[in-house]
Amino acid sequence: MNIEKVAILADSGCDIPEEFIEKHNIKLLGLKVIYGMEMYTDGLDIDPMMIYERFPDEIPTTSTPNTGDVIDIADKLKSEGYEKIIAVCISSKLSGTFNTVKTTLDEYQGLDTYTLDTKNISTGSGLLAMWAAIQLEQGKSFQWVTGELERKVADSHVYFYMDTLDYLKAGGRIGNVTGFIGKALNLKPVISCDEEGVYRTVTMLRGRKNAVEKLVEIVKKNTKSEKLWLSIMNGHAADKVEEVRGFLTENFKDAEIVAEKQIVASLAVHTGPGLVGIGVLYF
C-alpha cells in the first residue's frame, strides 16, 4: 500500500519490463532517438527492432528528455493525485538525463521530489526502480525508500558483452572500455559500470564459443551475496536468453530472475546487435 501517494518515475534507459511497469504503475520518461530531422521518443513511437533494421547504414543519435517533457509528466502525476515523486535515472556520466530531471523537479512546485543517479545503465538502473516500487507498495515511507536507494546504488550491477564495439565508439560512450580490440584475435570485453557510473572493462572474452557460460562465471565471481535479483537482457540476441537462464539457475540457487527482455531502442543505438547482459541486485 503506497500510503504517501508516491510515484516512481524512471527514464526509458532503465530498461524495466513492460509487464512490471503496468503491474506496479511506474511512470516512464522516454529518451529521444534522432535520425537527422526525425525525432522519436523511446518506447512510444520507436522500438529497438526499427534501430537494428536500419543498421549499419543509418546510426542515429540519442538525446535526453527536455525540461518540458519533465514538467508535463510532473503535471500529469500531480493531477492524478500523487504528492511525491521518486525519479530513477541512468548514470549521469553516460547521459544528461539525470541533470535535466533533477534540475527540473527541484524547481517544480507542489510535489516533493527526489532524483536518483543510479551510476548505472539499463537493468542496473531498472532493478533499483523496481525495488523502490515494491517497497512503497509494502508500506515503506518516501523518506525510508529514498535513503535506502542511496545505499543500494552500490548493490546494483550489470555485466554485458556485445559482438562489436563500433556502435559504442560511434556514440562516444566508450568510457574506460578498452578502445582497441584485436579483431584478429576475436576478443570482446565484458563491460560494467564503475563506482562513478562510467563504463569499464571487467575482463576479455575470446570468441563466441562458451561466451554465455563465461559471462555467468564472471558474474558469479563478482557477486558477494547469495540472495539476489537477477535480470537477463539481450540486444537482438534473443536466441541466447534460454542459455543464460539455464546457467543462472544452475549457479544461483537462491536468486530470483525478475526480468527478461530486449533492451530499449535508445540503448540499442549505442550497443548494436549481439548484446547479452545480466543484471544483479544484492539484498
Image (cartoon, rainbow, N blue to C red):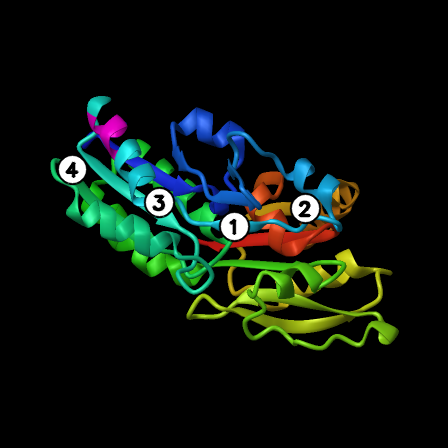
| Tag in front: 4 or 3 | 3
User: Measuring 87% from the left and 74% from the top, which residue is drawn there?
Assistant: 184
Which mark is in front, 3 or 2?
3
Which residue lies at the image location 35% right of the left edge and 43% below the top edge? 132
Contact (Cβ within 8 Å) of mark 4 with mark 1: no
Closer to the camera: disc 4 or disc 1? 1
Q: Which residue is mark 1?
A: 62
The amino acid beneath tag 2 is Asn
**What is the three-letter code of the residue carrying label 4?**
Leu
Which secondary structure type mostly characterizes the magenta part of the structure? Answer: helix
Front residue of 88 and 264: 264
Instruction: Name the kind of residue labelled 3 in the image.
Output: Asn
Mark 3 highlights which residue?
A: 66
Residue 51 seen in the current view: yes
Marks 3 and 2, the one that precedes in the sequence: 3
Q: Earlier in the sequence, mark 2 or mark 1?
A: 1
Which residue is label 2 attached to?
234
- Residue 2 magenta-highlighted: no
